[in-house]
Image (cartoon, coloured by chain):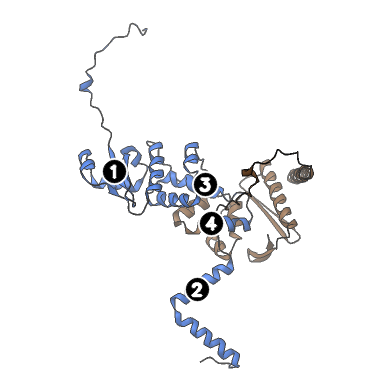
Amino acid sequence: MSVENAPVVDVDEAAIPVEKKMYYRFESNDKKEFRVSELAIQQSETLNRLVEAMGYTSEDVENKPAIAIENIDGKTLKLVFQWCEHHKGEAIPVDDGSVPKIVEIPEFDAKLMDIDNGLLFKLIWAADYLNIVQLLNVSCKKVANMAQGKTPAQLRRVYLLPSDEEDEAAKRAAQEAQDPRAREVEEEFEERKRQGGNSFF
Amino acid sequence: MGFLASLALALLECFRRRHSEELSSTNPAKPSEPKTSEESKTPIPKKPSTFKLLNLPWVAFNEVVKSMDPRDVFLMSLCSENTFTILKTWRTKVKWLCYIVDGNDLFVDISQSYNKNDSLYLAGTFSEIYEDVENQQQLVGVRIGGMDVQCL
């Protein structure tokens, strides 16, 4: 049947139920508000469960105050929701247990994560807190890529890994902070040792 | 035998690259255009990019290590006793492992399979370590599998 001969059916557009897009309002700890679509929210297991438990209707969203996310700032939350909106409707990946994990960073994600490492740290923290699996995967892959082709000394500098001496000093400082008497006992012990005493007690 | 041949090729490639780099560095520079006032200013040293890996939440830290190449995980375990203790839980079976001992140096290459890219990686590693030795970096004693070894 040609296109010209196809039967024309009059459709009453008003009769078709138009699915209204549902949006939720979220507020960061620095009081910045974001409107995020329901589909985008599904990328975050934490937020998805939260909105399900709250059972908000469209009217509730407008009338009630925005849902506060207390421990994420506006700058980080903006990146998180940008990522969720771009990847809305995508399937949430399941860990197949392969090591090393094969993760490809899409172009959009690479551009989104072209940020300083302080913000990247916050983004990973937020992805972990909000349980956004794929965002956590790509952001962690970016951090893992920083190690490529580095020597142990370079890795120590890049990842700010303390040396054995620094670890020991930090441990000693923590012990002293916990028990101020420990230093006095140690000094007394050293003093007695200098005086030639064999026994401390 | 095939491995030795490809390793030799990789080493030759490595030295050829080094030689060509040396030649290019000794070439006289082209006459440059007069510098503008902005260009003549001393460049601001770029702050090295750092990331507080150990401050990440445990789940995120696990994800980072899972996404890392096993070679990098191994090298990170050499950074300190603390990193070794943390990463020893990440023991994973590898299909291809190559230890090369040269004097006080130990080179390790790990892979799930052997292919041409591995030998190229080896060449890159040799080149980097060779440069480090030239810069007279001190060797550091570490323990691997209960044995004391020296590493850069």
Task: Tell me the tag on residue B119.
Answer: none
Q: CA distance from mark 1 to mark 2?
A: 45 Å
Residue at mark 4: B90
**Earlier along the polypeptide chain: callout 1 or callout 3?**
1
Q: Are marks 1 and 3 on the same chain?
A: yes
Q: Position of residue B29 (x, y in %)?
A: 76, 41
Residues behind callouts 4 and 3 on a single chain = no
Which kind of residue does numbered mark 2 sit on?
A: Ala
Q: Are marks 2 and 4 in contact (CB under 8 Å)?
A: no
- Whether the residues at callouts 4 and 3 have beta carbons within 8 Å, the answer is no
Q: Chain of mark 4?
A: B
- For the residues labelled 1 and 3, the Cα–Cα distance comes to 30 Å
Q: Which residue is mark 3?
A: A142
Mark drawn on residue A173: 2
Chain A, colour shown:
blue
Question: Do callouts 4 and 1 mark residues in contact (Cβ within 8 Å)?
Answer: no
Callout 1 amino acid: Arg
Residue displayed at 52% across by 54% down: B51
Label 4: how many Cα within 10 Å (few below 14, some 14–19, many 20+): some
Distance between the Cα atoms at labels 2 and 4? Answer: 29 Å
Please tell me whether mark 3 sits on a helix, a strand or a loop: helix
Residue type (three-letter) at the residue carrying disc 3: Lys
Question: Where is mark 1, residue-wise?
Answer: A25
Snapshot quadrant of residue A85 = top left
| Label 2 crowd (10 A; few <14 / some 14-19 / many >=20) | few
Callout 1 secondary element: strand
Q: Earlier in the sequence, mark 2 or mark 3?
A: 3
